[in-house]
Amino acid sequence: MRLLIIVVILFLNITNLLAQDRIIDSLQNKLIAAENNLEKAKLYNAISQQYKYTDPDKMLQFALEAFKISEQEQLKIEMGNAYLNMGTAHIILGDYQKAMDHFVWGKSIFEELPKTSQTSNEIAQGIARTYGSMGIVLSEQSNYTKALQYYLKAARVYEELEDKGQAAKIYNNIGVVYKAQSDNQKALEYFLKALLIQQELNAPNVGITQTNIANIYYKEGKLDEAFQYYTAAKSSLDTYPNTRALGEWYNSIGAYYQSRAYPEMALENWQNAITTFEGMNDKFGLADTYLLLAEFHNSQNNYTKALQAANNALNLAKETAVLEQLVVAEKVLSDIYYKTGNTDQALVHFKRYSTAKDSLHKKNDVRKAVEAAMNYEFEKKELLQKEENQKRELLIKEEAKSNNLKLLFGALIGLLLFGMGFLIYNRYQLKKTLTLQKELAEYEQKALHLQMNPHFVFNCLGSISSFIVQNGTDSAIKYLSKFSKLMRLTLEYSKESLIPIDKEIESLQNYLELEQLRFNDKFSFSITKDPNIEDDVALPPLLIQPFIENAIIHGVIPKQESGTISISFSISNSSLQCTIVDDGVGINQSRKNKKDLVLAHKSMALGIIKKRLEMISEATSKEASIAIEEMENGDEITGTKIKLKLPLQYTGS
């Protein structure tokens, strides 16, 4: 049976390779017969993409040939495609810095091209592919926030182009990023979105997506749903063979059967995984399978088989230099030897486990430092590229203006020339004035924002002072820990004009928990977000916190009983709405309490916020407003409601 499986796998691999060879041979025959350089550049790029999954060196070679011809003939679209192919080859070769450089250069070319009815789709496809490729590099570097930003941009372009196939690939990548961040619900949402399109298009990678969905259900303990998708994935992989994906599927279904207490079926599938991975010499996949077997046999007290599997995994991990697998293998071996009473070997492997674990931590620290440096260089290069593009566009405009003036000098009489010159001068002055007014408005808004930071910090420091006096040392340390986290979030976005809505919610959550601790759980709170709000929706920082502070200090705290505060975000008529409701003493009673205070101070927050809203409204030409009302039930005051209406804006826009 095992021999038959190996033969089938080898046959499928050979069949796929032969099919690819036939395509490449056909493209090379067309290349020989090509009559012009544009056709040659396109064919070189097409051949390059055919080597994507088999030979990155040849992919790079043919992309370079396409680039040489394109640069010589100034074929901008094919030059951009060549940059993208070279960048993809560098990803596969593991050189992320070079990959990102090529993607930045390609992006620059596509963005500066003038769109016409003949080229608009090709340009949009190039830009979308650039965004998606950048997302892959950032995801590989574990920079998930930026990766999501670029994936979402790519998805939006593909949606506008109605390119469902490429959009599905991006959805799947977004799901992988959310899965890496342990956000299973978001990951599942995008995997299901990708699957719906893949099934509609009969896409060959549908089995991989179904396995991803099954793994999430399995991780969440929804075993029936997991089995349903595992079964569908196997059927898809039989229809569209993918050896690596099949091996991963065997590993996953084996773990599923183990959790269902079907040990024979688990072992059978893991044995199939070994056969599959051996057929393609995939040592990484083999090591994963042996680790699963070692842990299984160890749990069954079958120490002989457990040792054999763990040693196999350890040897493979050493060959591939995968520290994560090496750490797990040494830990399992130490555990097995300890259970069998061989304390000397248990200690030896535990020491190796500790050493490997320390090396892994150091490796991750170095990787993060390198990634930070690469991200800095990437952002720096992208900024420089934008500046160069702007200078180039300005130069082109100036040259065009100069040519127009020369034609006018030859065609018009002196009086008309004088009039035209005067008109051009006036338009220039008007444009300069409008530009200065716009920049002044932007700086004024930033100045108002920066006024909020010291106000916010001052209030927080006052809270800390009173809390330390009224509570013990342990409570004060816990309070300071939460305060430091809140200040880190505040400082991180203090210079940004817009921040993602999820980061704003995280900051508000931390602030409310801080105040709960300060006032001994005198109030409860809830924060809700409409599911229709997309992840890249953004709003100005430190705009909502002062209202929540007032709701706590002047609303619910003066009450004798506990209070509640609810914050909700929704979208209505292309506007982002935030509603803050408290069941406190109400506006009039709050004002009366303030007058009775001996040490009352003048609050600047509301005035600053109103001014910021005016600036936001002017900058976006959309409504930005606030409404505060006292809630009543008959003659009884039930609290205060604040409605904040903001223009709908997005990160990176």
Image: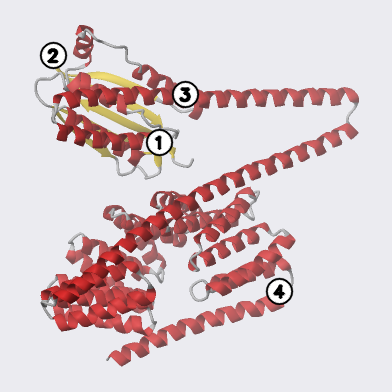
Q: Residue at x 28, y 90 (%)?
A: 2
Q: Label 4: which residue? A: 34
* Mark 4–mark 3 distance (CA, rounded to whole Å): 61 Å
Where is residue 392? Give x, y as percent: 69, 44
Q: Nearer the viewer, residue 421 or 363?
A: 363
View extreme (left): residue: 561
Q: Quadrant of residue 541?
A: top left
Where residue 545 appears, x then y in whole percent?
31, 28
Q: Is residue 224 above or below residue 486?
A: below
One can see residue 193 in this view: no
The answer to whether marks 2 and 1 mark residues whose Cβ atoms lie closer than 8 Å is no
Circle 3 residue: 447
Q: Amino acid at mark 3?
A: Ala
Q: Residue at x 32, y 91 (%)?
A: 4
**Amino acid found under the numbered disc labelled 1:** Tyr
Image position of 151 with respect to 328: above or below: above
Mark 2: which secondary structure? Answer: loop
Amino acid type of the residue that numbered disc 4 sits on in the rendered structure: Ala
Q: Give the structural element (helix, strand or loop) at label 1.
A: loop
Depth check, mark 2 against mark 1: the one in front is 1
In the foreground, 403 or 482: 482
Label number found at residue 635: 2
> Disc 1 marks which residue?
493
Position of residue 128 in the picture relative to residue 329 (left or right) = right
Q: Residues within 10 Å of mark 4 (few under 14, many from 20)?
A: some
| Amino acid at pointer 2 | Asp
Dot placed on the residue nearer the N-terminal end, 3 or 2: 3
Is 523 in front, or is 622?
A: 523
First reached walking from the N terminus: tag 4 or tag 3:
4
User: Which of marks 3 and 1 precedes in the sequence?
Assistant: 3
Front of the two marks 4 and 3: 3
Query: Which residue is at the front of the view, 611 or 315?
Result: 315
